Amino acid sequence: MLLNNEFTLENALKIIAPYKLIKQIKIIPAKNGKLQESSTGQLYWRESPELNDFIFKRLKISARKNTQIWDAISLGLENAFWRGNKNNPQLEVIVRIFLGKNGKIIQIKDSGNGFDYVKKIKLLKSGGNYASGLGRGLKALNKVDSISAGYQGKGNILNIVVRSE
């Protein structure tokens, strides 16, 4: 379920309470060598198997058993580098992982200017296409029943709650 209104970290923490921050990761793609060139010549970041394994191990979620959750989180990370940071290899993305009694949170914060997420979500729900990627990240978040997700502030912070089963 993708929330239409602002979804702050405070909102997310209330869902999984009590909680504990278990990890904060700063990722700068130029340092880890994970930039790739697309068919249009753009440089973009692709998550590495090591980073995905690390994140999903911390979240205690099986990527194989939860492919829709894996897709949603992976596309959130990719969009942070590609759209948020506009492929600038000098800008970082910060990932924070929280564990709580009722679920887990992954917060993805890019260094970009954000976007009008309320407008984009409205377009998605009306069936409209608004970006070259056709909204794959928002669509992935929107189709997972066990997720509550949304953006905070100016739209450069994504909070994803994966509720306990």
Image (spheres, grey):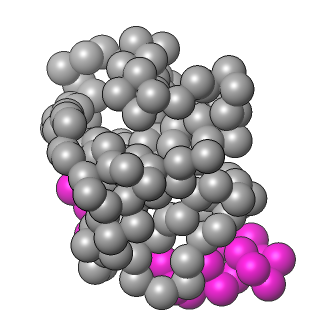
Q: Is residue 55 visible?
A: no
Judge by depth and name the residue closer to the eye, 34 or 144. Answer: 144
Instruction: Give me the residue at 40% from left, 83% from top.
Output: 6
The part of the chain drawn in magenta is 110-130
Side of 120 relative to 9 (left or right): right
User: Residue 104: x percent and y percent?
Assistant: 41, 47
Side of 10 relative to 1 (left or right): left
Q: Is residue 50 visible?
A: yes
Instruction: Give me the residue at 68% from left, 64% from top.
Output: 142
Query: In the figure, residue 43 lies in which quadrant?
Result: top left
| Above or below, comparing residue 20 to residue 48 in the picture | below
Instruction: Give me the residue at 40% from left, 12% from top.
Output: 50
User: Residue 138: x percent and y percent?
Assistant: 62, 62
| Above or below, comparing residue 50 to residue 113 in the picture | above
User: Residue 21: x percent and y percent?
Assistant: 19, 45
Side of 73 relative to 27 (left or right): right
Residue 35 covered by magenta stretch: no
The extreme right residue here reads 127
| Above or below, comparing residue 13 to residue 100 in the picture | below
Query: In the figure, residue 95 lies in which quadrant?
Result: top left
User: Residue 16: x percent and y percent?
Assistant: 38, 59
Judge by depth and name the residue closer to the eye, 109 or 88. Answer: 109
Residue 123 covered by magenta stretch: yes
The quadrant in which the N terminus is found is bottom right
